[in-house]
Amino acid sequence: MSDRETQPVERQLPTDEARDLLALVRDIAQREIAPKAAEEEDAGRFPREVFTLLSEAGLLGLPYDPEHGGGEQPYEVYLQVLEELAAARLTVGLGVSVHTLASYALATHGTKQQQVEHLPAMLGGGLLGAYCLSEPSSGSDAASLRTRAVRDGGDWVLSGTKAWITHGGIADFYTVMARTGADGPRGITAFLVPGDAEGLSAALPEKKMGLKGSPTAQVHLDAVRVPDERRIGEEGQGFGIALSALDSGRLGIAACAIGVAQAALDQAVAYATERRQFGHPIADFQGLRFLLADMATQIEAGRALYLAAARLKDAGRPFAKQAAMAKLHCTDTAMRVTVDAVQVLGGYGYTADFPAERYMREAKVLQIVEGTNQIQRMVIARHLAGPESR
């Protein structure tokens, strides 16, 4: 039984171009990604050739300026592409989201010269990016980061360790947040660091519960010398750039979560209509039918929420609160739905013969990355009631 046996998701897309794009993505997902997903995840293999294919197809720079190799697609469309990719294999969907996040700083705050020099290769030239904000001692409290950049003539010298870096050790470029001034958020600056820079190295990848094909590693910067031409934005502007990037990145995580949840629902429905007990398909039993109905409803609600936030962003309106809501709701939905999918499959759901158990393990990390869901609640509450008075 394959991972995706039901009909494609019915989508409302703004243009014929967008419909053709989603059809292309689904074709690539079904032919090139899904058939190998279980085997390669079990082996912990990162599918670099898939990312090369996606780059050649113009799918690694969808929301960015076509002048520099982007696809100029609205987030409403880009996020649905992520959902399709994540449904086929989360390592791919999340990888595209992280690459887009890593490209954000230069695409939105780089100088014209920087964009001309670097963006074409980043968005459509086969390169793969990583985003370096978290550190061993600063995860949710990102403003307390310790990686430091010291000015030395026309260069900056970066030293420190970044943690939990997706694509750590295999990325071609790293968007690195480093301290150039005093403690706190105003002393942080963003840099574009080449993956082959002298002094940059990665630890062995973390041994994770799920998402085993996507390398997550500490990245060490030992006196890495970067010319000032690779500083992104003004000195001290880095933390604001980082938070702005995360607002968009959270929408990417939300879309990936709905992709995983949809794949789990597809698996559960396919199994329930084929598996027979007491002379009937188990899908005939009301208790299970109601469970499937609840799963589908939660997924549709999550999809509507992330698309509503995306449309605000596309319209140039504030969307940070809605992005936090979407990340919170969609990732919690993915966790609930994947757990229920395992239950629908019964004992088979607990085996690696079916992908349900993999979806459940993968869903968990989505509640943690790019701001835990507890942090999302803090962000939402601040929009509603202002900052804490203590």
Image (cartoon, rainbow, N blue to C red):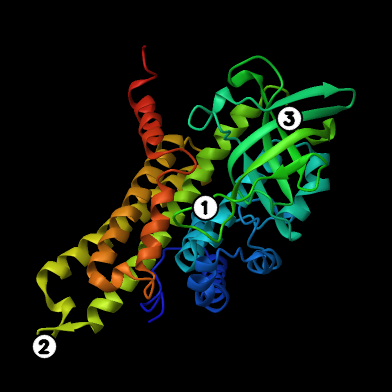
Q: Residue at x 62, y 57 (%)?
A: 62
Q: Which residue lies furthest to the bottom in this view?
A: 279
Q: How far apart are marks 2 and 1 (CA)?
A: 44 Å
Q: Tell me the number on the disc at residue 120.
A: none
Q: Residue at x 80, y 28 (%)?
A: 157
**Is residue 151 shown left or right of residue 139?**
right
Q: Mark 1 points at which residue?
A: 207
Q: Name the residue under label 3.
A: 159
Q: Residue at x 62, y 66 (%)?
A: 47
Can residue 312 be spotted in the picture? Answer: yes
Residue 270 lies, in percent from the top left, at 30, 78
Q: In this view, does 298 lie above or below 179?
A: below
Quadrant for the C terminus, please. top left
**N-terminal-most mark, 2 or 3:** 3
Residue 344 lies, in percent from the top left, at 23, 69
| Amino acid beneath label 3 | Ser
In contact (CB < 8 Å): disc 2 and disc 3:
no
Frontmost residue, 124 versus 217: 217
Q: Which of marks 2 and 3 is in front?
A: 3
Can residue 67 be spotted in the picture? Answer: no
Residue 369 lies, in percent from the top left, at 48, 44
The kind of secondary structure element at disc 1 is loop
Q: How far apart are marks 2 and 3 (CA)?
A: 67 Å
Q: Name the residue under label 2.
A: 279
**N-terminal-most mark, 2 or 1:** 1
Q: Tag 2: Cα neighbours inside 10 Å, few (<14), some, or many (≥20)? A: few
**N-terminal-most mark, 3 or 1:** 3
User: How many discs mark residues in the rendered view?
Assistant: 3
